[in-house]
């Protein structure tokens, strides 16, 4: 397989610091050496390649933008985004694992947890010794998380949880679940450890997308957890939504990785595939597709970079994240489809990666807020009128 060449039509690299480029390069090389040789087989077998977890921890990929005090890398948000970009260039499932571990498990513990919770969990999660998952979505409540049915009831020095969560990345392999439930009508966060009586996490099978990722249901039946397992500073729906903002930020970067992988593959194929005595790259319709790809990738890169700079300046708004997630995933999916088209029949076999990215991006397009929900978030922001109901 030809070595990956990163598209950079507008010299965006000139806007990155030496440290940011060095971090990206280290993750890029790891993806080339460790992920690419195993990811197709993992996808076909519908298994997450667990042997990569210690390596990811060694690279500092878990909670990378959280403080070094807790064993995290402490990098800026642009460097973190570049990490997510390179991981998703390998596979959306690999980036999803890191996103969930960092943005949806470590971030809420760091932001809303007690000092005891932070000191205990964050170093273990950063080292990959513990795996976490995030339970917000329910079978009947996805885009409307405020309607959740999962309940918590205080009982002495414990809370008793009842309910179910759906579409949970890492659920079946997680040592701890960050679970959101209503306590006296208010959304609160709880840490539920694996093996707690009344807690089960059956895996979701037979997926066409994100096959190299563990997806699960979380089921709570009179699940009793200690009172100290509540996240003390998480009160109301804004708490889990703030976690989703962190995850969506990483997704906006990750989608660029998928798009770059598909573009690079399609460009190389088009230049070497001969039809009618010349490479198909010489035909106008193929060039039109390739120009669309590089145009949108360039816009995606600039969008994510400015978003990262705003985040590092504490100026980022969640609506800006919605715009970036919405735009970048949409165009990454279009690019993956066009790449598959350029590859023709070869595009459906595992020798090529574009269709794997295409199938994965169908999920990324939907999760952490669907495309339409992000449209409405931005729509409300610019008009001042909510259109959710």
Image (spheres, rainbow, N blue to C red):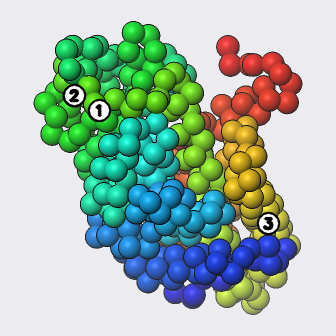
Mark with earlier residue (1, 3): 1
In the rendered view, tell whether residue 195 sits above or below residue 44: above
In the rendered view, tell whether residue 301 sits above or below residue 96: below
Q: Which residue is mark 2?
A: 225
Q: Quadrant of residue 154?
A: top left
Label 3 crowd (10 A; few <14 / some 14-19 / many >=20): some
Q: What is the secondary structure assignment of the residue under circle 2?
A: strand
Circles 1, 2 touching at the beta carbon (< 8 Å):
yes
Q: Which residue is mark 3?
A: 298
Side of 331 relative to 242 (left or right): right
In the rendered view, tell whether residue 331 sits above or below residue 266: above
Tell me which residue sits at (57%, 27%) in the image: 238
Side of 4 relative to 304 (left or right): left
Q: CA distance from mark 1 to mark 2?
A: 7 Å
Viewer-side label of 1, 3:
1
Q: Residue furthest top?
A: 184
Res 300 visible: no
Q: Which mark is residue 229?
A: 1
Res 29 visible: yes
Circles 3, 2 touching at the beta carbon (< 8 Å):
no
Q: Quadrant of residue 76?
A: bottom right
């Amino acid at each position: 397989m030809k070595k990956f060449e990163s598209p950079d039509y507008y010299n965006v690299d000139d806007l990155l610091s030496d440290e940011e480029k060095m971090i990206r390069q280290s993750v890029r090389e790891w993806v080339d050496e460790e992920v690419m040789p195993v990811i197709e087989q993992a996808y076909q077998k519908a298994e997450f390649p667990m042997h990569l977890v210690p390596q990811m921890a060694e690279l500092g990929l878990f909670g990378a933008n959280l403080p070094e005090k807790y064993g995290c890398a402490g990098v800026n948000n642009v460097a973190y985004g570049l990490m997510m970009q390179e991981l998703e260039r390998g596979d959306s499932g690999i980036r999803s694992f890191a996103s969930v571990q960092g943005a949806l498990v470590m971030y809420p513990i760091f932001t809303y947890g007690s000092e005891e919770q932070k000191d205990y969990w964050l170093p273990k999660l950063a080292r990959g010794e513990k795996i976490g998952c995030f339970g917000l979505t329910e079978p009947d409540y996805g885009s409307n998380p405020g309607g959740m049915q999962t309940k918590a009831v205080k009982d002495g020095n414990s809370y008793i949880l009842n309910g179910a969560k759906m579409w949970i990345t890492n659920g079946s392999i997680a040592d701890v679940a960050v679970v959101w439930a209503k306590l006296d009508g208010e959304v609160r966060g709880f840490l539920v450890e694996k093996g707690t009586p009344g807690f089960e996490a059956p895996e979701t099978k037979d997926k066409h997308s994100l096959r190299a990722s563990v997806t699960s249901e979380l089921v709570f039946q009179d699940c009793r957890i200690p009172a100290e397992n509540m996240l003390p500073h998480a009160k109301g729906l804004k708490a889990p939504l703030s976690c989703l903002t962190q995850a969506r930020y990483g997704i906006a970067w990750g989608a660029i990785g998928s798009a770059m992988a598909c573009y690079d593959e399609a460009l190389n194929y088009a230049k070497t595939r001969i039809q009618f005595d010349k490479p198909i790259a010489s035909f106008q319709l193929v060039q039109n597709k390739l120009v669309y790809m590089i145009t949108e990738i360039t816009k995606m890169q600039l969008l994510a970079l400015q978003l990262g700079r705003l985040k590092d300046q504490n100026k980022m708004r969640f609506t800006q994240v919605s715009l970036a997630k919405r735009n970048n995933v949409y165009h990454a999916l279009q690019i993956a489809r066009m790449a598959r088209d350029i590859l023709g029949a070869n595009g459906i076999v595992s020798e090529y990666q574009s269709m794997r990215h295409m199938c994965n991006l169908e999920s990324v397009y939907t999760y952490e807020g669907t495309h339409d929900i992000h449209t409405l978030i931005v729509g409300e922001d610019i008009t001042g009128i909510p259109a959710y109901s």
